Image: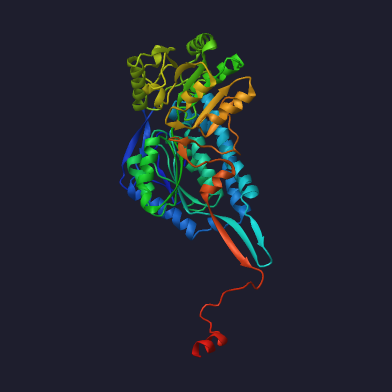
Amino acid sequence: MSSNLKDPVPHYINGEFVSSESGETFANISPYSNEVLNQVSQGMKEDINAAVLAAKTAFKKGEWGTLKLNERMKYINKIADLIDRDIEVVAQLESLDTGLPIAQTKKMVGRAADNFRFYAEMVKNRMSGEAYHVDDEFINYTMQKPVGVAGLITPWNAPFMLETWKVAPALATGNTVVLKPAEWSPLTAHKLSEIIHEAGLPQGVFNIVHGFGEEAGAALVAHSDVQLISFTGETKTGSEIMRNGADSLKRYSMELGGKSPIIVFEDCEFDRALDACVWGIFSFNGERCTANSRLFVQESISERFITALKERVQNIIVGDPSHAETEVGPLIHRDHYENVKRYLAIASEEGCEVYSGQVPEHLSNGNFVAPTLLLNVKNDMKVAQEEIFGPVLTVMTFKTEEEVIELANDVPYGLAGYVWTSDMKRGHRVAGAVEAGMLWVNSQNVRDLRIPFGGSKASGIGREGGHYAFEFYTEMKVVHVAVGDHHIQQFGKKNKAASARTKA
């Protein structure tokens, strides 16, 4: 198989590239031109059923779960090697399919290979149990076993990296996988299936079904043989997934929406804070869950900081995502473009000043939204409370530390937060007080694969990353072993003396 855009994108089920049982397809649209790139197999319940059966059979009757650890890790490392080999191809497909600038997709593809190598090492070195002696009578020990069939539902922003982020720990821990990628970004998911096929994994261990959330996604969530659902996407969709899978008592990992604050104090290192703020909201076209989409800047430096932001916004290079110099490309889909534009209209209605950069005229066919600042924002406005998920920064000011903590926490979400100050005591205080799963102090969004990733409140349930992924992808089993002849009560055994007294 090859990633030829002239060919319809197939599913990958039980080690084979197959069309939908219904024969139905849907169009994959270019975010740059809004022309049809290709057709994609439209998965339905019957396709999900086939994929889950393949995954269940591979887990229950196949060799994957019982492979020697070193043998399983050879497959995992082989996948990483093949990703490295195909970095250029994957990066180009990702940029073409999502509108993300090519300079950014190349970095993300490299991280995808790291995900597999990291978990190959992590499973060998950190997936270990505990053992306890109890007097001289028992040894109790734990072991971590794969759960079974993992249903993975991934988003359209940074799809390849986020797919591998879930697939790598799921496979490395011995589970089998059914992946339902986002319908708006199928190309690199298909490329991943080609890579895994070439790596030679046993049939049924890894499966992909393309399609829409209402059909393929819902069928995967409701399937009684799928024990795990890992989902990254909108909070509303996450809630619906949990309802749909409730009957089979699934285990969930949910990485959901965000409306993350960046708090800039007057004693910050100004230029570095400015760099981090601009990069954190306008990189990846603003389509990132951890984007610092709410700026709180201390009043004493607010005029200077906003002036600098305006200059940066005008200088950001909006262009063809395939060009190396492009910094902001088109949004993923026309529907999402219209939604972001709707929020800009709401901002005007709410009394904000909408300050935008420029989109060159020759890009009018694409889903381009210029980098935008929303000024004169109040924290209770829709644009400050709801996730816009585009290159749009809401700007607010504050006077005191206490005030900004209250403002930062007055939002439904709690995924990430950023603090800029030269007072490290204050940095620690504020980081501890902001209600979010992840905080960065004097840093942009940098990730260490060893640490947990996830949010609080409406931003998610559970943690992925590092050994924390084992809590989700493995079942903890406890074994109790007697090493001595401990006392066992003897119910029902006749006691001669007691029997004699009873008769007397």
Judge left or right: residue 326 versus residue 39.
right
- Image quadrant of residue 466? top right
* Marker count (numbered): 0
Q: Is residue 309 above or below residue 335?
A: above
Q: Residue at x 51, y 16 (%)?
A: 399
Q: Residue at x 34, y 16 (%)?
A: 350
- Front residue of 132 and 402: 402
- Front residue of 262 and 175: 262
- Image quadrant of residue 68? bottom right
- Front residue of 200 and 146: 146
* Residue 3 visible, this angle: no
Q: Residue furthest bottom?
A: 504
Give percent across and percent down for residue 143: 59, 56
* Residue 482 visible, this angle: yes
- Front residue of 407 and 248: 407
- Image quadrant of residue 369? top left
Judge left or right: residue 415 versus residue 244.
right
Q: Is residue 415 above or below residue 14?
A: above
Give percent across and percent down for residue 458: 43, 35
Judge left or right: residue 63 versus residue 229.
right
Give percent across and percent down for residue 70: 63, 52
Q: Residue furthest front?
A: 504
Q: Is residue 348 above or below residue 432?
A: above
